Image (cartoon, helix red, strand yellow):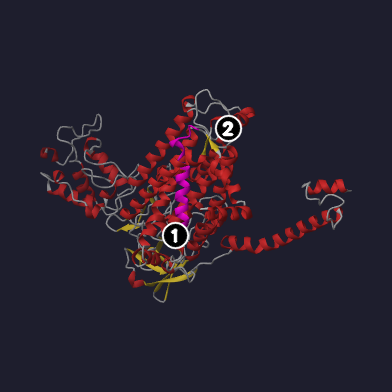
Amino acid sequence: MSFLKASLAWIEERTGAMAFIAPLLFHHVPRNAKWWYVFGSATLMFFTIQIVTGVCLATVYAPSAAQAWESLNYIDNEVPMGWMLRALHGWSSNAMVVMMAIHMLQVFLHASYKYPRELNWITGVFLLLTVLALAFTGQVMRWDQDAYWGLGIGAAIADRIPVFGDQVRAMLLGGPIIGGETLNRFYALHVFVLPGAAIALVGLHMVLIIKNGISEMPKPGAVVVPSTYRKEFEERMHTDGVPFMPDAAQRDMVFCGVCLIGLFALAAISGPIGPGGMPDPTLINTNPRPDYPFMWLFGAVSLLPPASETAIMLIAPAIGVLLLLAIPFFSNSGERAPSKRPAMVLLAVVTVMAIAALTWEGTTSPWSPVMDGWSSLPTPAKFTRGRTPLEMQGAVVFQYAQCRNCHALDGQGGRRGPELDAVATRLSYDQLVRQVQQGGGNMPAYGKNLDSAQTAAVVAFLATLHPSNEPDSMIPGAQLPIPTGSAAAH
Amino acid sequence: MSDDVKKSCGCGDCGCGTAAGRLPQSAPRRGFMVKLGAGLLGVGGLLTAIPIVGYIVGPATKRFSNVWVELGSVALFPAGQTRFATFLNPIRQPTDGDSAKTACWVRCIDTAKYQVFAINCAHLGCPVRWFAQSKLFMCPCHGGVYYQDGSRAAGPPPRGLFEYKWKVEGGKLLIDAGRLPGLEESV
């Protein structure tokens, strides 16, 4: 024991390591800083996992467009523990984004960004951007169909930039097409530039935490006054604070331990994420989707009105980042308690709900046609019973002409257009003919694509689609009956 | 003299600022050396930055010309039909692998009259699919729909499908292909 002590003293005398580390470990933190404060630590733990597993994966992964996909399958199937390393890296990435979001939400709700912690918040915003960039470039590393067409979407958005669109796109892709240099560009970002930036930013974030202290739990009435805050805070820490180690660190350790075991279980049970289909752009039967951290953006981009989408896609992200950066400058003093900042709480709630709703929309993507709806979905039996041969023929045309890709019957089919179970209560026979032939709304005109017999048949079928207890649609005043005689079927 | 030196040193306790300290250079000389050092580093840094920046922005400044690529015999593209065709992108690198493969849709309107469409939707670049029964191209991403002549039929695309220039030589259909199609210029 005394030998150990002597050894430590020997090292300490030559390095001064403990003199450097001790203030970091034992600095005083607020007594009431309880479980709310564990999320930043968990984010950092997942980041550490990312670095370790990432370095391991880099020892086998081939960062070349010709071989990346094969090398991932090799890691999954041949390399000992390779599948688990990929699973840990993939799930830890998602977990890091989630923890970071919760940490940010907590800091926002408690207004911890107010004086003197403005730069804590700002380095945090840059960390957010860096981590999201790591997540996006990580998706590219998978180099499967989703990665290829995701890059295609990125290229198409870059191409919409006025004047410099072409140059920005070429910079992004590393050339005029998505190819070898594209993957290597994103690889350099993913393994060198962005992790380097993240490590530097984490270091800065930590230095600021030590310098400014951990903020207390907000209390109504305990307002931040910049001129006196620091002095009073330091006094309170001196008289009422507790050392970070072990009083606060014990909760961090317990929470991080639970997170780590949870991550292990998730990775072991769910396995590695992807790779999906091989990155051959001539295999076009694909349905590109981004990873979960970007599903809300995918949903948002999909729901923009076409007329303004270019402007919104290019400007909104910049405005969003500027607003985040500006928050501590708009309000850097005053109340921190959520109960005294109802508008900010509402803003946070609305933002979380919007992101959740857009993630749901992106996941279900009701705007996407069901590309095999026409060939794979059955015509519901209830819509064929008692129909005339012409109407039955119309049901066939309805499938054959891919109407089902965008229109659901009995809940099955595309949701791009309205479900047609009761279309005859909304549109009269003549209106149905007009809609099929001329399209409109979001529907192509089928006038030139169907011959008159096909049109007559499909409209005859559509005119039968209404519940038996509801009347057919009529043009007001015209009182035109549906001339197919099918009403008797009901 | 010694006071000036002390100010510019700023350490105050190493003895370097006192007359008794180890001070091999006079203050003006040291000021000159700092300026010289900063100047040399600046010039060297700028020189080094030229190739680095040039390397990074290279793809944006390099011009690529499209090349006539053979899609196959005209017999593969019968009149009145729209057929899937693939080619190896003429602008490719050895490391591209499968990603150098490119797909397109060839519509033969009539003998020796063609339209060759890029696979990429004009909205956000996803691969469109041809449906011969309804004579429509549909995009799986956001429901962009195009008529058989490539014009926009429905959905969010701001324009029709991108078209390649084509020609027939020696019974083969050729297209002018290369860069990924985009809104700034058609293919």
Residue A24, x across and y down, in percent: 56, 44
Residue A233 against residue A126 in the figure, above or below: above
Instruction: Quickly name the residue at label 2.
Output: A238
Q: Earlier in the sequence, mark 1 or mark 2?
A: 1
Labelled disc at residue B37: none
SS assignment at label 1: helix
One can see residue B100 in this view:
yes
Q: Residues within 10 Å of mark 2 (few under 14, many from 20)?
A: some
Query: Where is residue B40 drawn, in percent x and y?
Result: 76, 60
- Judged left or right of residue B45, residue A465 is left
Q: Please, is residue A462 above or below residue B66 in the view?
A: above
Q: Which mark is residue A141?
A: 1
Asked if disc 1 and disc 2 are in contact, CB closer than 8 Å, the reply is no
Amino acid beneath label 1:
Met
Q: Chain of mark 1?
A: A
Q: Magenta stretch containing residue A32, yes or no?
A: yes
Q: Which of the pair A15/A225 is nearer the observer?
A: A15
Residue A370 in the image: state x and y as whole percent: 29, 51
Taking the image as shown, residue A379 lies to the left or right of residue B146, namely: left
